[in-house]
Image (spheres, rainbow, N blue to C red):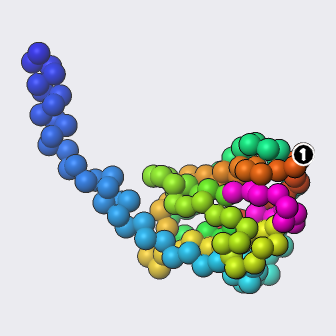
Amino acid sequence: MLIVTALLCAFLLVPGGAAADLADDRDYRVTAGYDEFVNALESVSPQAQIHTIGQNGIEWFSVNVPEGTTKLSVKLDWGDTSDVLALTVYDPISAVGTYYDSDDGITDGCTCFSLSQSFGILPGEWHLRVVGEDVEGTEDYTMQHKLS
């Protein structure tokens, strides 16, 4: 009983909002659109590996974001507007948002957007989850990202 009481007291002494304070500062600016992604790439021409996903399939990608990074730009491109892919972005604390084809203003089988914050986005391991929400057979897609 003494150990339980000591642990409870120690828990109560830890600042309760330590993790919540970080989460509260995560007011990312979301800028959508293909031009936003192209501008983020500048002169870089990354190679895009082709992936395949089916109905209810889930694929994960990791992005290591170093300290001082102010923007993460992402492009998920599958080209077939009859299939629905969803992209959920997770920073090191929790989900930031889920994005669909039309969220960038154009229904074209591609979603492009950037998450930014002037004083820096959270450093650490971010995750990108692609879900085949409504896919006929299988769908090929590419995933690209750029940190700046």
Q: Is residue 17 left or right of residue 89?
A: left
Tell me what residue is drawn at x 90 percent, y 45 percent. Answer: 137
The residue range painted magenta reads 76-86
- Taking 46 as reference, is 129 left or right? left
Magenta segment includes 81? yes
Q: Who's the residue at 30% across and 60% down the image? A: 21
Q: Whole-percent x and y of residue 11?
A: 19, 37
Say how many tags the image has.
1
For the point 75% across and 56% down, the residue is: 85
What residue appears at the point 82 percent right and 72 percent down from the top-left corner? 108
Identify the residue position indicated by label 1 in the image: 137
Asked if residue 81 lies left or right of residue 42, the reply is: right
Residue 96, horizontal then vertical, whole percent: 52, 60
Q: Amino acid at mark 1?
A: Gly
Q: Which quarter of the figure has residue 6?
A: top left
**Residue 128 in magenta?**
no
Q: Quadrant of the N terminus?
A: top left
Residue 87 vertical placement versus 69 (above, below) = above
Crowd tier of the residue under label 1, counting other residues whose Cα lies within 10 Å: few below 14, some 14–19, many 20 or above: few
